[in-house]
Amino acid sequence: MGPLSKIATGTNERTARLAGIGLMLAGIWAFSFGDAIGKYIVAAYPVGQLLFLRAVASLALLSPLIWRSRAEFLRLERPGLHLLRVVLSTAEVAAFFVAVRYLPLADVITFYLACPIFVTALSALVLREQVGWRRWCAVAAGFCGVLIAMQPSAQTVTWPALIALGGSTSFAVLMLITRSLRGASDVVLASSQFVGTLTFGALLLPFGWVTPSLPGLGLFALAGAISVGALLCVNRSLKLAPASVVVPYQYSMIVWAVMFGYLVFDDVPTAATLIGAAIIIGAGFYIFLREQALGRADASVNPPA
């Protein structure tokens, strides 16, 4: 390869990485915007109705891709694991929107930022992966951040806070299962999640249907469209650039959560929430960087053939 070819290759890689970063930031912004819309919707409509109509809009937008990939649904490997993933995904989405109905958006996002901490702990306990003492210390620090943000006492440990924490834990298990099903297509994984929320939302509809107005229907459709767009941005980001480049930008979610919470809902985050979020983000970054360092060490010992 000549000098000009090397320069062109390097330029293309940098362009792809910049595009990946841009798409990740756009996807996280879209997820945060969708979360704010969801919080606004559940103030007037039941959570089950949000889950149902949001999923209807999402599946309608995904229907051309679903039709094109229909053969892949018939040859799923480990269908039981796919089903468990859908159950966990539905549970964490429902938990999130139940929690944001009663808690500030930034508080709920803070609990969800602890997901990398939970994934690391569960990887050691469930998958028997090797986790050294440094990462265990980071896990412990992350849990301390959760406790600081939660401010546990008889008055502050409320059931919405526990639901948010449970949703974050469900999301962590969901990530572990998704890691083991990474051979499945993006369309299968995404659409199955929306089918799960559609089914669960339909089961809840008889317990609190509120006939939506025309603007209300527009909000439901917007929530579904944003969730699809956010998912496609994040997936494309991970295909354009290495995870080590784009994944840390997911922590920008707390910035948007604080901003949307303040501008839309007049939520002012407490000092405890901000301190806890900072500790959680720091612990998550350390775990992420430590895993990258271990990956590079393994690659140098066992270089690819």
Image (tube, helix red, strand yellow):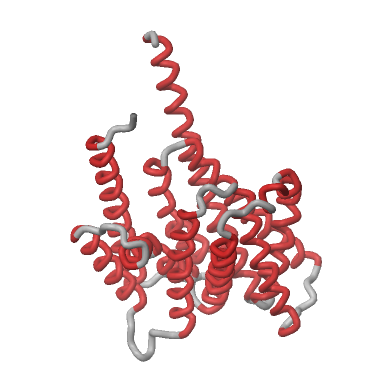
Query: Relative to residue 86, is residue 155 drawn left or right?
Result: left
Question: Where 161 sits versus 177, above or below?
Answer: below
User: In which image quadrant can residue 300 be found?
Assistant: top left
Q: Residue at x 28, y 59 (%)?
A: 283
From where the camera sits, is residue 264 visible? no
Which quadrant of the rendered structure holds the N terminus? top left
Q: Count every numbered label the image shows and give the total.
A: 0
x, y percent for residue 256: 48, 57
> In front: 269, or 124?
124
Query: Relative to residue 296, is residue 22 drawn left or right?
Result: right
x, y percent for residue 82: 57, 61
From where the camera sits, is residue 61 visible? yes
x, y percent for residue 111: 41, 69
Question: Where 162 sits versus 236, above or below?
Answer: below
Q: Residue at x 21, y 58 (%)?
A: 132
x, y percent for residue 171: 47, 65
User: In which image quadrant can residue 119 be found?
Assistant: bottom left
User: In which image quadrant can residue 205 be found?
Assistant: bottom right
Q: Residue at x 68, y 58 (%)?
A: 224
Which quadrant of the rendered structure holds the C terminus? top left
Q: Residue at x 65, y 51 (%)?
A: 75
Q: Residue furthest left?
A: 133
> In front: 142, or 304?
304
